[in-house]
């Protein structure tokens, strides 16, 4: 998968060289290219922002550098009949970036991220590219950050770990919170490792019982308990068919 990021803070994306994403790059599973938006400005001061039409506080990112940057990045793709890239525009006013969206984007061969600073990018940029490309305006949650770079780090990590070959164990995301399957819609419950006793606290007996059926049942019950405690909305909005007689009894 190829990922391009256009930003005025290329150094903000340096964590993409570390850990899971860094290893995926080193293994040739991810081709990440970070570009400095100011490279596509034409004035001496490399201006990327200006005052908003209609007045108001803050600054708006000018359309021209974004247009030149995106045309250039789009033109650097493989020639021929590949699937066109998806443009991902991080914004607090976008649709929610969920695990489902992460799976959808992980299936694409090429993503271009456009993290903005200030009050955002002149609307005409999304309107223009939206006529020719799949443009996704996405938010990572209901709070406001100073720019889209941290959201790009979040989204890239969520997407990269879904790519074939990136996680050591393909089963690693089978039980993820939000993954389909027996734990669908439930948050993960508690986990334990050695030693069997620490500060007088023992590992739950069932986990050392070797009884796989009881262990699976216990994990599901704990997941349900945790979810109803911290995110009851996930159960209310969940699929009733996902719950069995035993769940209703508890
Ligand atoms: Cl994608 N950008 C900014 N600036 N703030 C956010 C966000 C994105 N998602 C949540 N808050």
Image: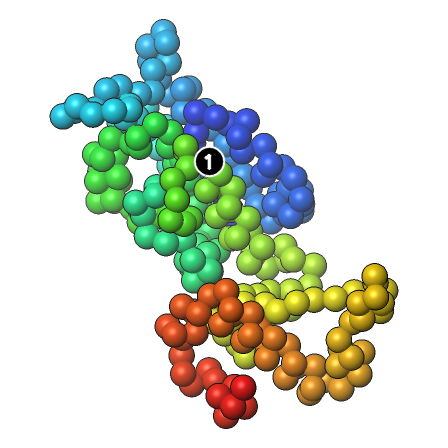
The location of residue 19, given as percent across then percent down, is 67, 44
Q: In this rendering, would 116 be left or right of 35? A: left
Quarter placement of the C terminus: bottom right
Figure colour scheme: rainbow
Q: Which residue is mark 1?
A: 149
Q: Name the quadrant containing residue 117.
A: top left
Q: Nearer the viewer, residue 210 or 225?
A: 225
Residue 190 against residue 39 in the figure, above or below:
below
**Residue 85 visible somewhere in the drawing:** no
* Residue with the most extreme front position: 200
Q: Name the quadrant containing residue 224.
A: bottom right
Residue 175 against residue 60 in the figure, above or below:
below
Q: In this rendering, would 26 be left or right of 41? A: right
Q: Nearer the viewer, residue 2 or 214?
A: 214
The location of residue 209, given as percent across then percent down, is 80, 83
Give the residue displayed 58% in from the left and 55% down from the top: 161
């Amino acid at each position: 998968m190829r990922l391009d990021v256009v930003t005025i803070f290329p150094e903000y994306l340096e964590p993409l060289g570390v850990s899971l994403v860094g290893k995926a790059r080193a293994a040739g599973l991810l081709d990440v290219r970070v570009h400095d938006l100011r490279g596509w400005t034409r004035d001496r001061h490399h201006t990327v922002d200006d005052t908003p039409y209609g007045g108001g506080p803050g600054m708006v990112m000018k359309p021209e550098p974004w247009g030149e940057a995106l045309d250039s990045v789009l033109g650097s793709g493989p020639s021929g009949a590949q699937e066109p890239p998806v443009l991902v525009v991080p914004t607090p006013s976008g649709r929610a970036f969920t695990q489902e969206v992460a799976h959808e984007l992980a299936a694409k061969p090429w993503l271009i991220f456009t993290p903005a600073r200030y009050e955002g990018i002149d609307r005409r940029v999304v309107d223009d590219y939206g006529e020719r490309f799949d443009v996704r305006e996405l938010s990572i949650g209901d709070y406001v950050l100073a720019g889209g770079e941290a959201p790009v780090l979040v989204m890239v990590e969520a997407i990269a770990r879904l790519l074939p070959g990136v996680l050591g164990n393909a089963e690693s995301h089978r039980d993820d919170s939000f993954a389909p399957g027996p734990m669908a819609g439930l948050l993960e419950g508690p986990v334990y490792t050695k030693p069997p006793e620490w500060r007088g606290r023992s590992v739950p007996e069932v986990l050392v019982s070797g009884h796989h059926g009881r262990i699976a049942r216990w994990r599901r019950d704990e997941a349900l308990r945790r979810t109803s405690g911290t995110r009851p909305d996930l159960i209310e909005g969940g699929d009733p068919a996902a719950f069995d007689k035993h769940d209703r009894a508890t």
